[in-house]
Image (spheres, rainbow, N blue to C red):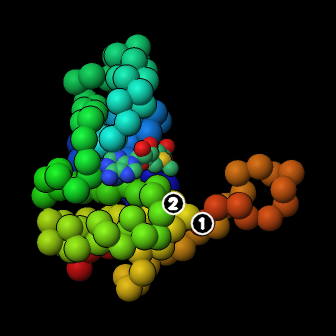
Amino acid sequence: MLTLAELKPGEVFFDLGAGDGRAVIMAAKDFGARAVGIELREDLVKRALGSIYEQGLQDRVTIVNGDIFSVDLTSADVIFLYLTTSANEKVKPKLEVQLKPGVRVVSHDYEIVGWKPVKVENFCENQTLGYPSHTIYLYKKV
Ligand SMILES: C[S@@+](CC[C@H](N)C(=O)[O-])C[C@H]1O[C@@H](n2cnc3c(N)ncnc32)[C@H](O)[C@@H]1O
């Protein structure tokens, strides 16, 4: 997903619903981005912070224990979503207002209805399945 979004060193990456922080950690560690994860669940925030400190990434990764709807996204270069179609629908107006033109939005498995993706990629998480088990939608803010 981060490769598809062409995430570059120094860019600002947001994961809206960051879970245990795996995407923000990868964005900082492997892509040299500054990463911000927003997560409602305190237990997941604690887990993410534990991994971030363990890997010495605290200067490049921030975790906000809060709601994605109350976060300022105007500094974002890349937005990552792994929510649901209905959550994407709710966050869409915020993305339309706050994102700069050119910002890449990657959504795992759930499309943003009404937006036209610039790329859709299917991939197999488990090769033994033999069929694509996930889809990534890449959008570019106009
Ligand atoms: C499917 S998980 C994705 C986790 C992570 N992005 C990843 O790909 O590994 C979705 C996460 O979004 C969080 N979430 C859902 N609604 C949220 C909201 N309004 N504000 C912040 N986090 C939210 C959930 O608690 C959950 O951890």
Position of 36 with respect to 118 (left or right) is: left
Mark 2 is on which residue type? His
The answer to whether residue 91 is above or below residue 115 is above
Residue 94 vertical position relative to residue 38 in the rendered view, above or below: below
Q: Residue at x 35, y 30 (%)?
A: 42
Quadrant location of the C terminus in the rendered image: bottom left
Residue ID for mark 2? 108
Determine whether the residue tagged by mark 2 lies in a helix, strand or loop: strand
Q: Classify mark 2 as within 8 Å of ligand 1 or not, answering yes or no.
A: yes
**Dot 2 crowding, Cα within 10 Å, few <14, some 14–19, many 20+:** some
Image quadrant of residue 77?
bottom left
Please say if the residues under marks 2 and 1 sit with CB atoms less than 8 Å apart.
yes
The answer to whether the beta carbon of the residue marked 1 is less than 8 Å from any atom of ligand 1 is no
Horizontal and vertical percent for residue 124?
Answer: 72, 57
Q: Residue at x 22, y 56 (%)?
A: 69
Which residue matches tag 1? Answer: 135
The local secondary structure at tag 1 comes to strand
